[in-house]
């Protein structure tokens, strides 16, 4: 047994672990504990970063929804404003058309009045010419009628002047 190399190898192995085993065990467990602490720290850091990322995502989603709501509100206001502007433009166009129509009607009425005056003036001229012809024909035939007409004209002159002044 003492001559067998396996015995001495086994004994050396056992003595090595008895002498250095505690130190090796402490060093190995210390290294493993340090590694476990490092992994635990990394996991805690990853969890913290994940929570922060989730919070940032939630904030970004809230901000996006808020911005979307503001955009929709702005769009609604813009549409309402555009509708108001269109309505105002329509009313302005209608008012302008009404003004132009009124001006055209006024011009037509003025032209009608002018035409009526011209017709009346022309009719009066024709009537005066016809009356002149009739009167001159009759006056030349009968001088008494001329005197009577002149007297009636002079008598009705004050009344005609009063009517024209009023």
Image (cartoon, rainbow, N blue to C red):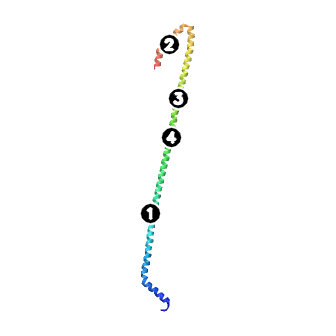
Q: Position of residue 162 (x, y in %)?
A: 46, 17
> Which residue lies under the disc numbered 1?
52
Secondary structure found at label 3: helix
| Quadrant position of the C terminus in the picture | top left
Secondary structure found at label 1: helix
* Alpha carbon distance from label 3 to label 2: 39 Å
Q: Position of residue 38 (x, y in %)?
A: 44, 71
N-term-proximal mark, 1 vs 2: 1
> Which residue lies under the disc numbered 3?
107
Q: Which residue is at a point 52% across and 27% down the rendered structure image?
A: 110
> Which residue lies under the disc numbered 4?
89
Q: Which residue is at a point 47% across and 16% down the rendered structure image?
A: 161
* Alpha carbon distance from label 2 to label 4: 64 Å
Classify 10 Å Cα crowding around label 1: few (below 14), some (14-19), many (20 and above): few
Classify 10 Å Cα crowding around label 3: few (below 14), some (14-19), many (20 and above): few
* Alpha carbon distance from label 3 to label 4: 26 Å
N-term-proximal mark, 2 vs 4: 4
* Alpha carbon distance from label 3 to label 1: 80 Å
Give the number of the disc on residue 153: 2
Q: Position of residue 139 (x, y in %)?
A: 55, 9
């Amino acid at each position: 047994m003492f001559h067998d190399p396996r015995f001495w190898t086994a004994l050396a192995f056992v003595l090595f672990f008895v002498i250095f085993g505690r130190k090796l065990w402490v060093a190995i467990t210390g290294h493993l504990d340090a590694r476990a602490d490092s992994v635990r720290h990394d996991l805690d850091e990853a969890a913290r970063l994940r929570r922060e990322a989730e919070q940032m995502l939630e904030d970004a989603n809230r901000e996006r929804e808020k911005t979307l709501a503001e955009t929709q509100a702005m769009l609604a206001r813009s549409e309402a404003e555009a509708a108001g502007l269109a309505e105002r433009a329509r009313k302005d166009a209608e008012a302008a058309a009404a003004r132009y129509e009124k001006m055209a009607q006024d011009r037509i009425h003025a032209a009608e009045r002018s035409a009526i005056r011209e017709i009346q003036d022309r009719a009066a001229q024709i009537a005066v010419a016809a009356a002149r012809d009739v009167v001159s024909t009759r006056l030349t035939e009968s001088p008494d009628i001329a005197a009577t007409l002149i007297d009636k004209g002079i008598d009705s002159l004050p009344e005609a002047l009063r009517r024209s002044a009023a």
